Image (spheres, grey):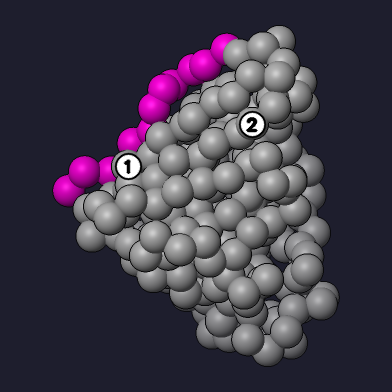
Amino acid sequence: ETGVTQSPTHLIKTRGQQVTLRCSSQSGHNTVSWYQQALGQGPQFIFQYYREEENGRGNFPPRFSGLQFPNYSSELNVNALELDDSALYLCASSLGGTIWNEQFFGPGTRLTVL
Amino acid sequence: DAKTTQPNSMESNEEEPVHLPCNHSTISGTDYIHWYRQLPSQGPEYVIHGLTSNVNNRMASLAIAEDRKSSTLILHRATLRDAAVYYCILRTNYGGSQGNLIFGKGTKLSVKP
């Protein structure tokens, strides 16, 4: 069974640029959630995709957008990067969007915005 | 949002039990109590969850107060590998999404050899 993988591992961008982060969910999982983790803080929920549809969103502006593909992998896109977007971006997959299912996290993508 | 309160940090000695407290006085009747931990340089990992009754699994035990306003994660014998940030999370319907986790700052557990 393959776990959750994310790419790239690290990324450096400059302010105003756009970035795409990728996530492959664990085999059999149909739900992907994205989180942003600033240094020293707990992860903050960005949004969740369930069967290719956005299924909830946290307090993030529209320049944070996402996609989920038929194979349940997912992308996080961030436009017009700001310095405060520097963080660890985590994706988590689960089977269904229920409140008792375990979420399996990937190792994250470290984004640095200069 | 359902919120939890945890101590910022705790210390333990290796091979001793550890009790990590969590207060959640605003918990509602349908909120599940979840614990995740995050080891250094890794994504969070699930530890345990419960609703009303105490729960045990291979990693830990979860003791839930009768009024559900607090809970305690119990590591029966701490190892060096258990050094991590532990997050107590109330999982609830939020903004139409039933699956997201609302993390606080968690408790940083240090384990001394």
Name the amino acid type tagged 1. Answer: Ser
Q: Position of residue B92 (x, y in %)?
A: 63, 75
Which range of residues does the magenta coloring cover? A1-12
Q: Chain of mark 1?
A: A
Answer with the quarter of the image where residue B56 lies: bottom left
Q: Is residue A95 left or right of residue A12?
A: left
Q: Is residue B77 visible?
A: no
Considering only vertical position in the picture, is B103 above or below A9?
A: below
Q: Position of residue A32 (x, y in %)?
A: 43, 54
Q: Chain of mark 2?
A: A
- A2 part of magenta stretch: yes
Q: Position of residue A5 (x, y in %)?
A: 34, 36
Circle 1 SS class: strand
The residue wearing badge 2 is A79
Residue at point 37% right, 65% down? A51
Q: Is residue B25 left or right of residue B74?
A: right
The answer to which of B49 and B76 lies nearer the viewer is B49
Can you tell which of label 2 and label 1 is closer to the viewer? 2
Name the amino acid type tagged 2. Answer: Asn
Residue at point 67% right, 12% down? A14
The crowd level at tag 1 (other Cα within 10 Å; few <14, some 14-19, many 20+) is many
The residue wearing badge 1 is A24
Task: Give the tally of numbered discs.
Answer: 2
Considering only vertical position in the picture, is B11 above or below A8?
A: below
The crowd level at tag 2 (other Cα within 10 Å; few <14, some 14-19, many 20+) is some
Q: CA distance from mark 2 to mark 1?
A: 21 Å
- A62 part of magenta stretch: no
Residue at point 40% right, 52% down? A68
